[in-house]
Image (spheres, rainbow, N blue to C red):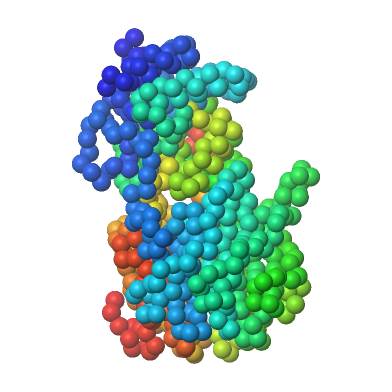
Amino acid sequence: MTPIRVGAVLSFATRALRVTGNPETTNGASFITLNSRSGLRPTGSDKNHNSSVGLRRMRLTSLALAFALLAGGGAFAMDFKPYGRGAFGQLTKAHAGRPLIVHFWSVTCPPCLVELPQWAKIAAEKKGFDVVFVNTDGDDDRARAQARIEKVGLSRADHYGFADDFVEKLYFEADSAWRGELPFTALVAPDGGVVTVTGAVDDPLIVEWLEKRVAK
Amino acid sequence: MKRIAFALLAVCVPAMLTAQEAPRAPADADKAAPPAQSAPPAAMSHHPAAACTEAKVDCAATAVPAFAKDGRLWVAFSVGKSVYAAASSDNGATFSAPTAIATVGDGVIDAHGDARPKIVALKDGTLLSSYTTRPDKQMIGTIFTARSTDGGKTFSTPQPLLNEGGQRFDSILVNRKGRIYAGWLDKTHALKAKAEGKEFLGSGVAFAYSDDGGKTFKGKSILIDHACECCRMSGALDKDGTPVFAWRQVLDGNVRDHMVAKLSADAAQATATRVSDDDWAINSCPHHGPSIAIDAAGDWHVAWFTKGKKRQGLYYARSLDAGKSFSEPEKFGDDARAAGHPTLVAAKGRLYRVWKEFDGTTTTVEMQMSRDNGKSWSAPRVVAQTLDASDHPELIAHNGAAYLSWLTHKEGYRLMPLPRDEKSAAAAR
């Protein structure tokens, strides 16, 4: 795994302060990948939510360079990890012990796009829980999905993309009654218990779940 | 410091997670679970279930059938950035080499879920295909039509139905006189409202007609506003040859229930009535449009999916007074098996409804038939199944017989005749 060290060195300069600034992230590497920039500030502070374009570009360039070196070129700065059969169980297992939100969205779902900035804020300010985003579009729409993510400042969040056309199976694994309506959100308790919500981020179930976590 | 170093590694390479608590790439879950440290590079996204990338219907995600005057079955489908039509002389068992209708340079072809390229056959042998493209940078569509007057050997240069505004989810019908009706969902009013800083929910419902075999469409206009923009429209011809369309509407309070409207012969007027008060108040995209069929007696039949306050699951209702009133919604399908994507067809005194169910492993297409115009239905019967990805089921009637048209990754395209009598319909299961 030597190449990874190369990546680490390349982006050390732009990331070091951020990581030390958030004790939560030192619990495990997976949580670091979940954090977007403002997530490293104290909860409630969303000033300067978006870094200056120049700085952002620099970071992206650094990341892209690191990735290019690692993957042998052709990789994006941000990428969607494939979400296939068994993915939901793997995610809940990987995040076991911590509350987790798995948020499913699509570029063909206008309500999803409208509320994406709110999800960016949640991902940025979250504390004590993890958020994973799953784009349900096919590969054809992934560039469009990526543009949306970048637009709302969610580039650094943990992103997955549907990588299997057997969508019934992917839906079923998250909720056996889910037929693919979006936005769709799974609220996963530390013990793995799942509550699902069809509809917007202002759904009382989501609001209540977040309030409970914030209050902790 | 060691922990921070680990954290840094993950920040730099989000796709190549190395720390102990890092989630491994879920897409490989079917394989033996390796420890997190040996997680595969998850960035290499691909579609493992896509059967192939060749220009044939078995490689497509959606397939829409039409029987031509000469008895051949045509299907419209897309693979990659191209739209094709292919013909079968043996009811879908084999297909001739497909004819390319269009290849899209910029953007994508709408062929996913409720959206799909389509084809209709005219009496004079003309084939009319329609498909929607979405540009790379905008979330609006353009509906194109292309014609073939040489038995599908070649298609005309595709023409946009409209050049601006944004359209998706067309439904095209041809009546006995050869008049073609088109209905679609249109974003024009929504875009205008957005430009003016006003709120506008959903899309418009627009219509047009053609008397020249689809060369040109007249009377293009948005007659109703606020349709749910991500669910298909469905259309059927009434007894008098004018079309009736069904769609999901965004009603007051963001309620997404179903409406139907019969179009006037000149496509200039449509009065919408509500099929059912399910009270599904939700700010979401169900991606799950209704289906309408009209039988020889002129009764209207609608099937749909809802997760409303008043009812959840698949429902059916009929109207014996041309949409003025509908029967109490009747539930069908098994909620425990995520029953979805219902569709209806009427064929020679019989009415069929099919839908999908999934038990976590097997997707089945369930079927019921009615010989009394939807008053009573045979017991549900599995007419097809698959263990992998599949398209929504489609129904088609031809020469008095009804067929299930279903594209699945494992089995490819299938056209299956549905039983004609109660006894065989009730058999099995």
Q: Nearer the viewer, residue A163 or B327?
A: A163
Please determine whether, in this image, residue B291 is positioned above or below residue A141.
Answer: below
Q: Is residue B296 visible?
A: yes
Q: Is residue B6 visible?
A: no
Residue ID at (74%, 71%): B218
Please determine whether, in this image, residue B193 is positioned above or below residue B171.
Answer: above
Please determine whether, in this image, residue A127 is positioned above or below residue B360.
Answer: above
A43 relative to B178 in the view: left or right: left
A81 relative to B311 in the view: left or right: left
Q: Nearer the viewer, residue B121 or B398?
A: B121
Q: Which quadrant of the figure contains the N terminus of chain B?
A: top left
**Measured from the top left, where is residue A165 in percent x and y?**
39, 53
Residue ID at (76%, 73%): B268
**Measured from the top left, where is residue B213 in percent x and y?**
64, 77
Residue that lies at the very extreme toward the right in this rendered image: B196
**Measured from the top left, where is residue A57 in percent x and y?**
55, 22
**Measured from the top left, where is residue B78 in percent x and y?**
47, 60
Residue A43 occupies quadrant: top right
Residue ID at (62%, 86%): B176
Residue B258 occupies quadrant: bottom right
Q: Which quadrant of the figure contains the C terminus of chain B?
A: bottom left
B275 relative to B152 in the view: left or right: right
Residue ID at (36%, 38%): B44
